[in-house]
Amino acid sequence: MVVGITEGLPEDYPVTTMPSAAETTADPPVATRTHDSRIELSGVTKRFTSPKGEAFTALNDVNLTIEPGQFCAIVGPTGCGKSTTLSLVSGLDKPTSGSVRVAGREVSGITPGTGFMFQLDALLPWKSVLDNVALGPVLAHTAKRRAQQRARDWLRRVGLAGFESHYPHQLSGGMRKRASLAAALINEPSLLLMDEPFGALDVQTKAIMSNELLGLWEQTRPTVLFITHDLEEAIALADVVVVMTARPGTVKDVYEIDLPRPRGAVQEIRFQPRFLELHHQIWQSLRDEVETAYASTREARP
Ligand SMILES: Nc1ncnc2c1ncn2[C@@H]1O[C@H](COP(=O)(O)OP(=O)(O)OP(=O)(O)O)[C@@H](O)[C@H]1O
Ligand SMILES: [Mg+2]
């Protein structure tokens, strides 16, 4: 299966050619596998203490359910609590009040079966690409040889075959993202938490990575919580788009994205009338919050 755009890219750029599950050599993901990674936030409030020692509310009474296998994108103005929401679901932080449940269990500590992908690459600079990707299985007590075999397979899936011995600094930004994606997916997480994972990429590479993510997600169907500032990206990828209010963040609107799947190339779906309609509708909701957040930061200036 070949997806994505390749025009204008260097000849040696790893093109988005993803083998189907049947073509892969090790532990092919099972497309029909069902995970029970329902995410349920009810009445979630999170307060922090500011550097001046004042308490402030980052999240206020957030209620949200994401069904198992659903791809949920969260959009909202800067500082509205999107990353905070993600860290509560991951178990890296706890709510001040309310409940965060994954697969029916109250989150306490790092949620098992979770894969992460953040805006900054979490690759270890002193390890090769192969060892970076193999790290997850190694930490999960898989024998090193077997872990490396799986890592090779995942590097092939994300189009990085031939780059196994490279170190992160020897890769382009887009290639590092591919390696991070392989590292996030190698344990076949039932829950994938992504915080602006492609935010720092150029438009073309971002589109290619989005296509790759969709292709891989369609094979294994983890529940995804994907944070982005890019509304087009959110609509192109997700089943539901959640709009959060300006701080204190809460759920303002939830939009079901009824574009058919498989979606195909994300850069083409943007021209479909239904896409434009959804974009227009969601932007109306988001724009007010962005303006409110911007106005409050201007007021806060000395
Ligand atoms: N550990 C912390 N201690 C104190 N304040 C925090 C902490 N983490 C986040 N905040 C504050 O909580 C608010 C929400 O932060 P958060 O990072 O969740 O926003 P965001 O929606 O992800 O913003 P952005 O779009 O800019 O990434 C911000 O005002 C931030 O300063
Ligand atoms: Mg953030």
Image: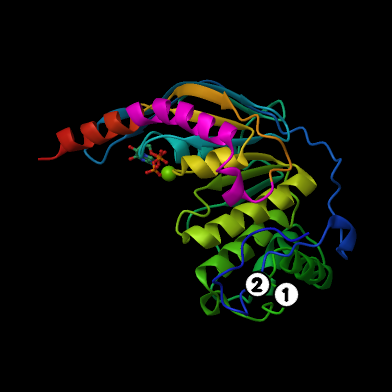
All told, the count of numbered labels is 2
Nearest to viewer (mark 1 / mark 2): 2
Q: Locate residue 242 relative to residue 220 in the image: left or right.
A: left
In the image, 209: left or right of 228? right
Residue occupied by mark 2? 14
Q: Which mark is residue 171?
A: none
Q: Is residue 250 left or right of residue 163?
A: left
Q: Residues within 10 Å of mark 1 (few under 14, many from 20)?
A: some
Earlier in the chain: of badge 1 and badge 2, it is 2
Q: Does the stretch in magenta take in 276?
A: yes
Where residue 65 appears, as percent x and y from the top left, is 62, 24
Magenta highlight range: 264-288
Give the residue type that dot 2 points to.
Pro
In 3D space, how far apart are the residues under numbered discs 1 and 2 (Cα atoms)? 8 Å
Tell me residue 140's x, y (percent): 75, 57
The label number, if any, that marks residue 161 in the structure image? 1
Q: Which quarter of the rendered picture does the C terminus lie within?
A: top left
**Cβ atoms at labels 1 and 2 below 8 Å apart:** yes
Whole-percent x, y for residue 151 in the image: 75, 67
Front residue of 169/267: it is 267
Q: Does mark 1 have its CB less than 8 Å from ligand 2?
A: no
Q: Which quadrant does ligand 2 occupy?
A: top left
